[in-house]
Amino acid sequence: MTTGLSFASVFADDIGKLSDFYRRVFGFDEVVELRSEHFRGLRVGDTVLGFSAHTAYDMLNLAAPENPGDGVSSFLTFEMADDDEVDTATKTAVAAGATCVKAPARTYYGAWQSVFLDPEGNAFRINHLTLESP
C-alpha cells in the first residue's frame, strides 16, 4: 500500500484572499472544480493545498479553537529546487504580505530555510533540503 498526501488544509478567515496570497507567492494553480463558499484549493504537485472557511468546522464535526489567534499549531513547508529559489521566494512572500520570522539560514540538518507568518498568522517555511546518500 502506498499512502500519499491528497490535501493539506488551513482554516482561514478569508479563503479567497489567503489562497490568492499563496498563489501569488508560489505560482500555484487553483483547483477550480473544488471552489465553493467554504473552500479554495491550490494544486501543489499531487497535493491540494486547501483553505477552509470557519463554516467547515461544523461540516467536519470539529470544534473550533476557543482562541484561534493563540500560538501556532501547524505549519506548511514548501520545497524549492535550490537555495537561490528560497531567497527569491522569501522576497516574494514578504512583498505579498508575509511576515518573515526567520530569514534564510542553514538549519542544523543542512536545509536552507526561511520561516514566515502568512497574512492570517499561519506559519509556513520555504525550504531547500539536499539529502546526500552515504
Image (cartoon, rainbow, N blue to C red):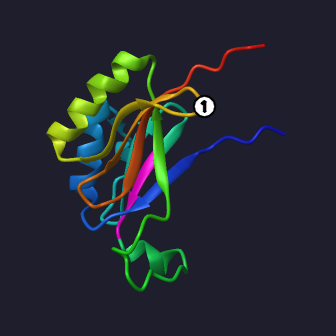
| Image quadrant in which you'd find residue 94 | top left
Q: Residue at the bottom extreme? A: 66
Of the pair 68 and 87, the residue shown nearer to us: 87
Q: Which residue is mark 1?
A: 109
Where residue 10 appears, as percent x and y from the top left, is 42, 59
Q: Residue at the right extreme? A: 1
Q: Which residues are magenta?
A: 49-53
Of the pair 62 and 89, the residue shown nearer to us: 89
Q: Main secondary structure of the magenta part?
A: strand
All told, the count of numbered labels is 1
Where residue 113 appears, as percent x and y from the top left, is 43, 33
Please report the residue visible at 35 percent of the width from the left and 20 percent of the height from the top.
85
* Mark 1 secondary-structure assignment: loop
Where residue 99 appears, as percent x and y from the top left, is 24, 49
Residue 9 highlighted magenta (yes or no): no
- Neighbour class for label 1 at 10 Å: few (<14), some, many (≥20)? few
Please report the residue visible at 24 percent of the width from the left and 38 percent of the height from the top.
93
Where residue 42 appears, as percent x and y from the top left, is 38, 42
| Image quadrant in which you'd find residue 80 | top left
Image quadrant holding the C terminus, namely top right
Above or below, comparing residue 13 to residue 87 in the picture: below
Please report the residue visible at 62 percent of the width from the left and 44 percent of the height from the top.
5
Please report the residue visible at 33 percent of the width from the left and 74 percent of the height from the top.
69
Image quadrant holding the N terminus, namely top right
Q: Which kind of residue does numbered mark 1 sit on?
A: Tyr
Above or below, comparing residue 81 to residue 31 in the picture: above
